[in-house]
Structure formats: C-alpha cells, structure tokens
Amino acid sequence: MKNITIPLTIPQDILITLNQKEEELREQFQITIAMMLFQQEKLTIGKAVQLSGVDCYEFEKALAKNNVPVVDTSIEEVFADATKLKNS
C-alpha cells in the first residue's frame, strides 16, 4: 500500500508552547484525526487504527482517554437485537 504525505504548516512557537518535538506533534495529530474520523463514522475501527499509526490496543486506549466509545450501540438496539434472537 502506498502512503501519501500531507504537508501541514504549524508556527514554530506552537511547538515551543506545547513543549513538543515535531514528531511527537505529528503522531498526536495523526491519532486525533483518526479518532475524529472514526467518531464521525467515516472510518471503520480497522481503518482508523491504520491511519492512527499505532496498534489497536494503543488506539483503543486513546479512544477511552477521549471518551470516544468503540461501539456506539444504544440500549434500545441491544434489546431489539436480543428480542430478534429470542424469536428466531
């Protein structure tokens, strides 16, 4: 699979303010963008993990830290599924 690079311009004083190295900020951006696209249901969990650049465990930890559910199923949906299974 071929990767592409998307240039992003950030004022240097932002790195100083955040006390981060360029690579650290790039990794943080990549994970944050992957979480955002996953939360918006634009990416599956697998594709979001792929975009994030970390393994599944680390990505799910980032989701939990940011209160983003891995599964967004309501209690009503769970009961509806249980009823369907019971009746089949």
Image (spheres, grey):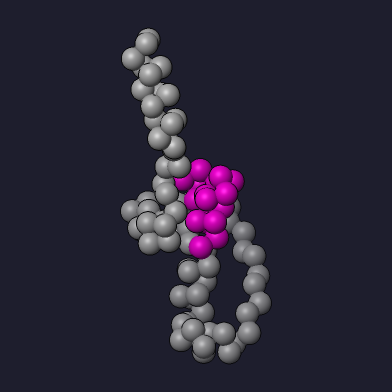
Q: Nearer the viewer, residue 41 or 76?
A: 76
| Residue at 63% across, 84% down | 11
Give yes or no for residue 81 being in the magenta stretch: no
Quadrant of residue 87 in the image?
top left
Please state, as top left, top right, bottom left or bottom right, where the C terminus lies in the image: top left
- Outermost residue toward the front? 76
Residue 70 location, x and y as percent? 41, 46
| Residue at 64% across, 72% down | 8
Q: Is residue 4 left or right of residue 46?
A: right
Q: Is residue 41 above or below residue 52?
A: above
| Residue at 38% across, 19% down | 83
| Residue at 51% across, 63% down | 32
Residue range highlighted in magenta: 32-48
The mark tally for this picture is: 0
Residue 58 location, x and y as percent? 36, 58
Q: Is residue 85 left or right of residue 35?
A: left
Residue 33 location, x and y as percent? 55, 60
Q: Is residue 24 above or below residue 76?
A: below
Secondary structure mostly seen in the magenta stretch: helix
Quadrant of residue 82 in the image?
top left
Residue 34 location, x and y as percent? 52, 56
Give yes or no for residue 36 being in the magenta stretch: yes
Q: Is residue 44 above or below residue 77?
A: below
For the question of whether residue 24 can be seen, the reply is yes
For the question of whether residue 51 can be seen, the reply is no
Q: Nearer the viewer, residue 21 or 88?
A: 88
